[in-house]
Image (cartoon, rainbow, N blue to C red):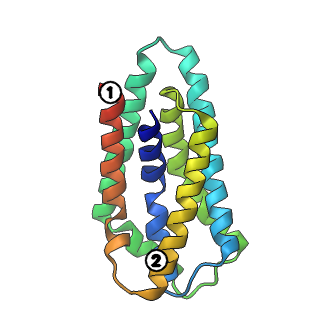
Amino acid sequence: MYWQIIILAVASNIDDLGAGFSLGLKGRLPWRVIWIISILSGLTMAIGILLGGQLSFLLPSNVPHYIATFIFICIGLWFIFQGYKGKEEEEAKKSSGQQIGWKTAFILGIALGIDSVAAGISGGLSGFPILLTSILAWFTSFLFLWVGSHFGSLVSIKFIRDFADFFSGILFLLLAAAIFWF
């Protein structure tokens, strides 16, 4: 189960790598911005796991796994669809030239954390431990934002932000398969 938790944390936060990279193109993100966004990521994952855990008590034994699989498939397909639409490029254009303060960081953290709620619900339905999963969600968000910001400030390639949704979508589909078959 631990490798499934790692996949969940990475998949739900890989868009942070693209966001950090996009924002880092105009300079490194301040530490307070990285902290705010990553803490919100861990909190939104915890909220999702709590909701999913409560739902699992109301459903027959096998149903939560099927629902979790279905949700992960939907999230994975959604991310792949977003990759085709070029969502990160639009967000990068909107954010270029703006200072990132704590209010913007909070809004960005909520926006990036919405998928963590959905992923957390599936994790809760699958019985993932809330503390470990939330800490890993916080850590991967922090790491991806920092790494993305660092490399974004050093180079101006678009690879990470252009394909972050595809990578995330594929990881969610793999997680759905792992939950369904294991």
N-terminal-most mark, 1 or 2: 2
- On the image, the x and y values in percent for residue 38 come to 62, 60
Q: Which residue position holds label 2?
A: 22
Q: Position of residue 178 (x, y in %)?
A: 33, 33
Q: Position of residue 61 (x, y in %)?
A: 46, 12
Q: Which of the pair 132/102 is nearer the observer?
A: 132
Q: Quadrant of the N terminus?
A: top left
Q: Is residue 179 above or below residue 79?
A: above
In the structure shown, which secondary structural element does the residue marked by tag 2 occupy?
helix
The kind of secondary structure element at disc 1 is helix
Decide which of 137, 75 is in the foreground and name it: 137
Outermost residue toward the front in this view: 2
Q: Nearer the viewer, mark 1 or mark 2?
A: 1
Q: Residue at left 56%, top 53%?
A: 113
Which residue is painted at 54% across and 31% down in the image? 124
Q: Residue 168's x, y, as percent?
A: 37, 54
Determine whether 138 is above or below 146 in the image. Answer: above
CA distance separating discs 1 and 2: 35 Å
**Nearest the eye: 91 or 150:** 150
Residue at (31, 64) in percent of width and height: 85
What residue does disc 1 label?
A: 180
The answer to whether 49 appears left or right of 14 in the picture is right
Q: Which mark is residue 83?
A: none
Q: Quadrant of residue 176?
A: top left
Horizontal arrangement in the rendering, residue 69 relative to residue 110 (left or right): left
Which three-letter amino acid code belongs to the residue tagged 2?
Ser
Q: Quadrant of the C terminus?
A: top left
